[in-house]
Image (cartoon, rainbow, N blue to C red):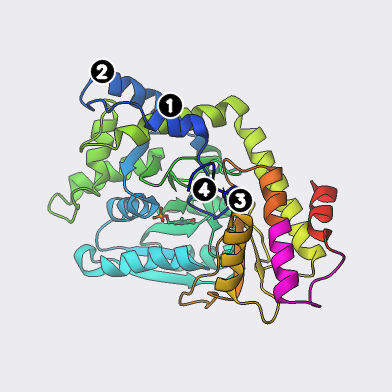
Amino acid sequence: MTAATTPRQRLLTPGPTAVPPQVLAEMALPIIHHRTKQFQAIFAELGQQLQQIFCTKGPVLSIAGSGTTAFEAAQVSLVTPGSKAITVSGGKFGERWQDIYDAYASALGISQVKINCDWGTPAPVDQVAQALKDNPDASVVTIVHSETSTATMSDIKAIAALTAKSNALLIVDGITSVGAFECPMDEWGIDCLVTGSQKALMLPPGLGYVGLGERAVARLKQIDEKTPASFRGYNLDLRKWLKSHAKNDVPFTPPVSLIRAQKVACGLILEQGLPTVHAKTKKLAKATLAAFRALGLKLISSSPSYSVSGAYYPEGVDDSAFRKALRETHGIHIAGGQDGRGGKWSGKIFRISHMGFVDADDTRAALTAIETELRKAAAGQIKGEPGTAVKAFDAAY
Ligand SMILES: *Cc1c(COP(=O)(O)O)cnc(C)c1O
């Protein structure tokens, strides 16, 4: 797809997201070698920018791979072998982090205390408190801040206040919160915060980031000393990444083009200022939910995230035909639903992103297309006159 494609293509999926032209241009520069002063200078600056975006004084590691690579690395590197992990899930991604510990169960001797809440509801803080009390031997808690599959936000501040008083480290999936809305790592006491490049950080897919707080750095060292023969992995062993990071380096060949482009994208975020970027995301989300309500759509979340909004289809709308019409007639790309253990939402819902390089006009275009196609597919079930969605969006924006 090129810029000349008609209609103009707008990517409003909750990852990957649109990439600004300055960032794309940076990726077209000639490849530089990574064991050079030039690369180290770029990498050092990116490291500082990421610390500002994560709101931490600790190191933020840049790992080749996707968000899942970065989260898996945190999971296997920070857990004390032979202990317990409290894993909180209310959607597809929370389930993925449970699956990963299941996959490593015998290698790490790790068992899980799984806390599952209904899809579309936030993590139950009281149940996490109880699990920490009942399992003083738990070494980590994993949780998703913004569960993209259900467009739901959880109260990480409250959960971090609990883990701070325990021996368990808090590993937070901030893949659709970091850079989108408030998630101040040090202030809240998050021990490990993970994100990926292709959501709010305005880069193509290919990099994952792991922010490490003081307790997490200490844990890496402690596991290394106490259990030298234990499972450490290789590429996913954060000790290697941390050691290199201290020298503005990485253990293996990094995607140099993505790293220099991420520096440009982070520069765009910091130039606007984090509070401005956060406020924009929140405004887009609130106005989009107002538009959904005005059309009479039922929201999928009781605790909506600011980075992604979702609604149930009215009776009779075919998800794949609907999203095909959005793409082909309007150039609008949004996401459908996903299936997991706790929910079967494929074909039942749709989701639209508010992260990164997206503005009110992109969102108005998407809402107009959504309203138009819903009126065609579910005539009589959509409230108001044509134009209702954008009118409600504008009134709320
Ligand atoms: C996208 C996403 C992931 C997975 O990231 P990948 O980069 O696809 O591995 C995990 N968690 C959340 C909340 C996400 O939105």
Residue 327 falls in image quadrant: bottom right
Judged from the image, the secondary structure of the residue bearing numbered disc 1 is helix
Rendering coords of residue 219 (x, y %): 31, 45
- Does any atom of ligand 1 lie closer than 8 Å to the CB of label 4? no
Which marked residue is nearer to the observer: mark 2 or mark 4?
4
Residue highlighted by disc 3 = 7
As drawn, the label of residue 48 is 1
SS for callout 4: loop
Mark 4 and mark 3 lie on one chain; the one further toward the N terminus is 3
Q: CA distance from mark 3 to mark 2?
A: 44 Å
Residue 205: image x %, image y %?
Answer: 40, 47
Which numbered marker is on residue 37? 2
Rounded to the nearest whole Å, what is the CA distance between mark 3 and mark 1? 39 Å
The amino acid sitting under disc 2 is Lys
User: Which image quadrant for residue 269?
Assistant: top right
Residue 46 colored in magenta in the image: no
The residue lying at 51 percent from left, 48 percent from top is 17
Q: Ligand 1 is in which quadrant of the figure?
A: bottom left
Disc 3 on helix, strand or loop? loop
In the rendered structure, find residue 116 and report the number of the disc placed on it: none
Q: Is residue 51 visible?
A: no
Residue that numbered label 4 is attached to: 17
Taking the image as shown, residue 160 lies to the left or right of residue 42, namely: right
Name the residue type under label 4. Answer: Thr
Q: Nearer the viewer, residue 253 or 9?
A: 9
Q: Earlier in the sequence, mark 2 or mark 4?
A: 4
Crowd class of label 3 (few under 14; some 14 to 19; many from 20; radius 10 Å): few
